[in-house]
Image: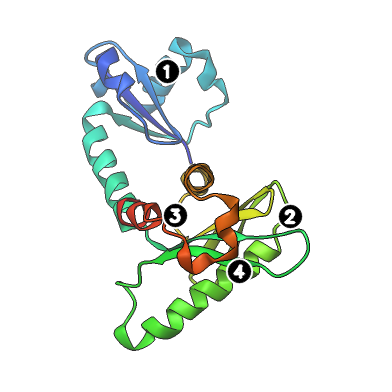
């Protein structure tokens, strides 16, 4: 569904970042214009709106604050449960090199099994992702985002169903860059000796 915010100043329009929402400048007093007339004005002012269906929603820029607050609340509610880096050789078993879990939202009596599930899920999806490929796999209420960069190294993030794909993959790429820079390949043979606290940091921040 399309939504259009019309505004009395260009400054308001420049601050709108709401996905599929368009921000268009309309001269003052247009907020009193009936929606059908406002849409006609919008089409005249911006040819890119020619493909917008007449049934789209119209809002004035005074509604931007409410919409942005709702979006921020939704992002805050999104959850990352697990972050892991794995060795995924072209032949041989997949090895978990380092991981961090946030099981605070899971009932106490389920934490042990949930941690095991995260590790198993991460290893399984990493094994099934070809080199130089990204993919997202959903399992019940969880979604695993995987990036196999090639060279025997993959990273997996397990989130809830609402976590957006693009930020997840951006985060995976960033973590792989930092892991390769800080942990030499010679250390992969002994995962218990690997220290990579950045995973826990990202888990807390993102």
How far is disc 1 from disc 4 in space, using C-alphas?
51 Å
Compared with 54, 90 (above or below) is: below
Residue 84 locus on image (x, y percent): 50, 61
Near mark 1 (Cα within 10 A), the count class, few <14, some 14-19 or many ≥20, is: many
The first of marks 4 and 3 along the sequence is 4
Q: Nearer the viewer, mark 1 or mark 3?
A: 3
Q: Nearer the viewer, residue 3 or 66?
A: 66
Q: Which residue is mark 3?
A: 163
Determine whether label 4 and label 3 are within 8 Å by CB. no
Q: Judge left or right: residue 87 versus residue 157.
A: right
Occupied quadrant, residue 196 = bottom left
Helix, strand or loop status at disc 4: helix
Q: In front: 188, or 7?
A: 188
- The first of marks 1 and 4 along the sequence is 1
- Find disc 4 in the rendering and name its residue: 123
Whether pointer 2 and pointer 3 mark residues with C-beta atoms closer than 8 Å, the reply is no
* Residue 146 seen anywhere in this rendered image of the structure: no
User: Closer to the N terminus: mark 2 or mark 1?
Assistant: 1
Cβ–Cβ below 8 Å for labels 2 and 1?
no
Q: Earlier in the sequence, mark 1 or mark 3?
A: 1
Circle 2 — which element? loop
Q: Residue drawn at (23%, 12%), measured in percent from left and top? A: 28
Q: Which residue is mark 2?
A: 130
Q: Is residue 126 left or right of residue 18?
A: right
Per the image, label 3 sits on a secondary structure element best described as: loop
Count of labels in the image = 4
The residue located at (64%, 62%) in the rendering is 126
Number of the label disc, if any, that sits on residue 134? none
Which residue bears the numbered disc 1? 42
Q: Percent position (x, y) of residue 76?
A: 29, 53
């Amino acid at each position: 569904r399309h939504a259009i915010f019309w505004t009395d100043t260009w400054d308001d329009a420049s601050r709108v970042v709401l996905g599929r929402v368009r921000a268009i400048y309309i001269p003052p007093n247009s907020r009193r214009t009936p929606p059908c007339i406002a849409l006609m004005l919008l089409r005249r002012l911006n040819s890119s709106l020619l493909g917008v269906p007449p049934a789209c929603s119209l809002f004035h820029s005074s509604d931007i604050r409410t919409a942005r607050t709702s979006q921020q609340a939704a992002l805050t509610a999104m959850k990352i449960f697990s972050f892991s880096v794995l060795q995924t050789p072209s032949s041989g078993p997949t090895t978990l090199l380092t991981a961090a879990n946030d099981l605070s939202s899971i009932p106490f009596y389920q934490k042990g099994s949930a941690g095991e599930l995260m590790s198993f899920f991460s290893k399984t999806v990493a094994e099934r992702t070809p080199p130089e490929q990204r993919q997202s796999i959903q399992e019940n209420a969880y979604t695993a985002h995987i990036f196999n960069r090639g060279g025997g190294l993959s990273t997996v993030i397990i989130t809830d169903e609402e976590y957006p794909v693009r930020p997840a993959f951006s985060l995976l790429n960033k973590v792989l860059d930092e892991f390769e820079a800080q942990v030499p390949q010679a250390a992969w043979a002994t995962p218990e000796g690997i220290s990579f606290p950045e995973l826990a940091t990202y888990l807390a921040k993102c």
